[in-house]
Image: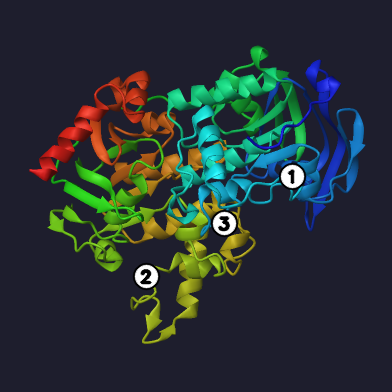
Amino acid sequence: MGADLTLPADARSGGPALRLRGIVKRFPGVVANDGVDFEAAAGEVHALLGENGAGKSTLSSILTGLYQADEGSIELYGELVRFRSPREALAAGVAMVHQHFRLVGPLTVAENVVLGDPRPAGARLRLRSAAIEREVAALATRYGLDVEPRARVWQLSVGEQQRVEILKALYRQARVLILDEPTAVLTPQEAEALFVTLRAMAAEGRTVIFISHKLREVAAVADRVTVLRAGKVVAAVDMADTSPEGLAALMMGREGGAVGSRAEPYTGSGTPVLELDDLWVEGDRGVAAVRGASLVVRPGEIVGIAGVAGNGQRELAEAIAGMRAPRSGTIRAGGVALRGGNARASIAGGIAYIPEDRLGTGVAPSLAVSANLILKGYRSGDFSHGPLLWQHRVRVFAQALVERYHVRVAGIDTPARQLSGGNLQKVVLAREFSGEPKVIVAAGPTRGLDVAAIEAVHGYLRDAAVRGLGVLLISEDLDEILTLAHRVVVLYEGAVVGETAAATASVAELGLLMAGGAGAGSAAGAAAAGAAA
């Protein structure tokens, strides 16, 4: 494994590892951190909570050398430090698994893991050696992070890329490890396994700072919790003295919003708005990623697709949206077969698509918010005359959507890349819903969002179902699926291996199916055998 780090005596004895005092960070027009005091002990898992814009990312960036504080001090194992770069922070043993990944697409998993290895050149293994691949494979196996060391990063799903980022930090044996939403793509069983790993790291004297919006996970793994709101610390509590509901109230400044109840059973009827019949879709590596999937979504129904990232969810969504041509099988919207691999045909057929990568796929980052809101409709007579856009109509339309969906933005001319994750997702939702679709395909629609933004997105999806739209919700968050969906379909290795009503679904059974247990293998095998016949 990566170079071993000898922990200071304070760490081995359970003493304080990290102290921040009076941290202030200002940006034009905003104070991101306003006198933040934060302390994490060696040997503990410390959760850092707060809505988007609360100051968590800024504080983490200061800890890892991306930003320097305007005021305040940082102590690491009793010594004052000031990191001028991420390299300095890493050299001191402070590492972070970022929500937005720092990976090089053309390189393999193993190459990305060892890229930037701080060990002296004489001790560093050759980047492309088989030994490195074996080392990374052993590390992945040890921590239950299923990823192929030789795979190119660009071929991986978002969830798999997140595992690579975790491997990078583990490879360097960080003394202080900051994890930003590390379980977003794991089954309940895998999340529990990761928690065991985090506890083991803490038992070794290391400090784990756990950033998550999944309050039940925080309750399961954290020793202590610090809550930020509007750049200030509003609470620092022992987890044993609070609850998910209490944490949600602290984060939002009001009661409610911790954990949603399950959706009521579906009672509607009518012609299905979306039908998949024995759908086979190839992945980027040329092998079947979706294998014989069949399902139905009816008007007003929310169907949840549960599964660990990398089990065909991305390829399934892209095939329905017309971004990837199926190998075989049929996709019907409103009873009409769609032409595979044709995004315009899918749009014309009433398919709206909310991709898992909102910044890379959902929007054009450099274009204005107004331009992003008409990306799917700018050819219509409502917005253009020949090659010319009716700018006034575009602005009126965009401003109306910004107000309707409560997008917080300085103006509709603001480039999309400057928006927070929650507001960026609202732009995507506003654009997709404005086209009057029949079906919403939502892939990870709340990944990385704060509690308030999650509530807003959930509300839009529920409203869509009430209006008679069908919703196909693809998420690795079982709580989200069970909160929203009427019916749950489990995908494993590209095949449908289980289906149940959300109101009566067992989390443990769904988790086993997602992990390939409880008959998943036989179901997948039956699908493969049927296709072969």
Q: Position of residue 44 (x, y in %)?
A: 71, 20
Label 3 to label 2, Cα distance in Å?
34 Å
351 over 298 or under it: above or below: below
**Of marks 3 and 1, the one in the foreground:** 1
Q: Nearer the viewer, residue 437 or 12?
A: 12
Numbered circle sitting on residue 328:
none
Label 3 to label 1, Cα distance in Å?
20 Å
Q: Are marks 3 and 2 in contact (CB under 8 Å)?
A: no
Q: Is residue 392 visible?
A: yes
315 over 63 or under it: above or below: below
**Of marks 3 and 2, the one in the foreground:** 3
Q: Is residue 468 visible?
A: no
**Residue at 42% across / 36% down in the picture?**
476
Q: Position of residue 325 (x, y in %)?
A: 25, 60
Q: Residues within 10 Å of mark 1 (few under 14, many from 20)?
A: few
Q: Are marks 3 and 1 in contact (CB under 8 Å)?
A: no
482 over 83 or under it: above or below: above
- The answer to whether residue 264 is left or right of residue 71 is left
Q: Residues within 10 Å of mark 2 (few under 14, many from 20)?
A: some
496 over 396 or under it: above or below: above
Q: Amino acid at mark 2?
A: Gly
Q: Quadrant of residue 511?
A: top left
Q: Mark 3 — residue?
A: 104
Q: Position of residue 368 (x, y in %)?
A: 56, 69
Q: Mark 2 — residue?
A: 377
Q: Earlier in the sequence, mark 3 or mark 2?
A: 3
Numbered circle sitting on residue 119:
1
**Residue at 23% across / 56% down in the picture?**
326
**Residue at 14% across / 58% down in the picture?**
337
- The answer to whether residue 36 is left or right of residue 337 is right
- The answer to whether residue 205 is left or right of residue 327 is right
- The answer to whether residue 359 is left or right of residue 533 is right
